[in-house]
Image (cartoon, coloured by chain):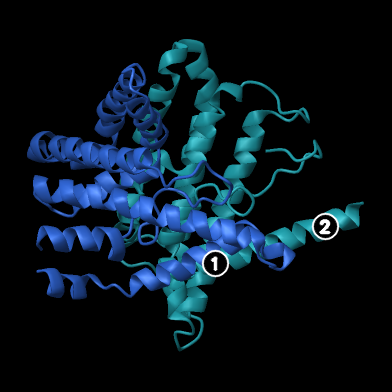
Chain colours: A blue, B cyan
Amino acid sequence: MSYLGIVVTSVFASNAILAYGFGSIPVHENERSGQFASVLAVVCVNAIASTFLWGIHSLVLAPIGLESLDILFFTLLVVPLFKFLSRAASFSGSKFISQVGSKADDLIIGSLVFGIALISVNSGFALSHALAASAASGFGYWLVAVLLESIRERLELSNLPRFFKGSPAMLISTGLIALAFMGIDSTFISGLAG
Amino acid sequence: MNEGGSGFVPNPILSGLIGICPLIVVSRSLAEGTIYGLGAAMCALALGALAPLVRAFITDRLHAPATLAFSAVLAIAFGFCVRIYSSAIATGLWIYLPLLAVSGLSLSTLRHGSLLDRSAPDGRSRFAVVALESLMFFLTAAFVGGAREIIGLGTLTLPTPGMEPLRLVVVNISPLRIFVSPAGGFIFLGFLVAVYRSTIRAIRRRQL
């Protein structure tokens, strides 16, 4: 598949939250996710984490037949690295970089980063393809999070039955968005983008 | 965790939406829901049991990385056990087996790890609360998997050992196939949360 095909598939057809269930749905009021710092954090964290896991998996664990231990090496090597990087970013002096660092720190321990890294490694991609897929998956997650955030705001103002207010309405809305995203089929994308 | 000190422990999935997203994708059948729920519950229980030891022997700065590494070891060990028990279920659960290391329930236990050697406000031990939450997670995951499979495919796949799990045909058609997809999972869980809320509210009203 071409890079464009991988990117479009990762953002829409194989969306991290809607197709794989990584990350969390913004059910409660959050800090606005539509910021450049958050999109940069989510894309960078996923790209770097996937690159590291790809390296550990393909260059170290696969030759000795210990691929199933990748999650352990990920927690032992990549998580401390990110903790260090996010702490270094907070001391950088730049407000924007420290904002990116703090958002990256919130993201690192969770199913989003671990899941996307494992998917890009298990898909049999080359390094450059894995990098593109993971960065695009991060962007896809951010896109859906922003979409759900604005839906949550509108749902709060709408006249819903009492028991559906809050998380039930959000879950049903997420399901409907997932249905729409399912329409963007990966076979169609590969036919279109090569 | 404890609402109003009444001793009521809410369902972690239906009330707190803990670990809900991977569960929606994974619980397409009774077998997958049951095994995933069991794995998440066992990891959370082991982490809960380990928390006082971690606090006692490991410095504060290393609590989180050590517990996370232990969680990864547990997830890998559980993955091996599932592969031996039933390779078909292990294949169905795919990367979600190693991801048990960072399942919502494990992370919730990890975050509350520093509190686990103390008592909850109602006097119940924190570990008892973790155990109860884990049990509820397991039962809810099994229920969600079973219900979605019946509604979606009209079958019920039992978590039996061997190459292929036993599949019972409940109805001879696939009533609403969409319910076994992630989109249907989100919709199903949305309705389930609404039913849970209304039931809890009715019970509370009756108690008052």
Label placed on residue B39: none
Q: Quadrant of residue B113?
A: top right
Residue at x 24%, y 52% (from the top left corner): A136
Question: Which residue does the numbered mark 1 point to in the structure image?
Answer: A172
- Residue A15 relative to residue A122: left or right: right
| Element type where label 2 sits in the image | helix
Identify the image quadrant of the N terminus of chain B. top right
- The answer for how far apart the CA atoms under marks 1 and 2 are is 25 Å
In the image, what residue type sits under mark 1? Ile
Q: Amino acid at mark 2?
A: Ile
Residue B25, quarter of picture: bottom left
The chain containing the residue under callout 1 comes to A
Depicted A108 relative to depicted A94: above or below: below
Location of residue A68 in the rendering, given as x and y in whole percent from the top left corner? 23, 42
Q: Nearer the viewer, residue A4 or A17?
A: A4
**Along the line of sight, which residue is nearer the eye, A35 or B172?**
A35
Closest to the observer, B139 or A41: A41
Query: Looking at the picture, how far across and down is residue A124, in whole percent?
Result: 13, 53
Q: Position of residue A92 (x, y in %)?
A: 31, 18
Give percent across and percent down for residue A27: 56, 52
Q: Which mark is on residue B203?
A: 2
Q: Residue at x 54, y 43 (%)?
A: A30
Identify the residue at horizontal 37%, vertical 40% (top origin). A38
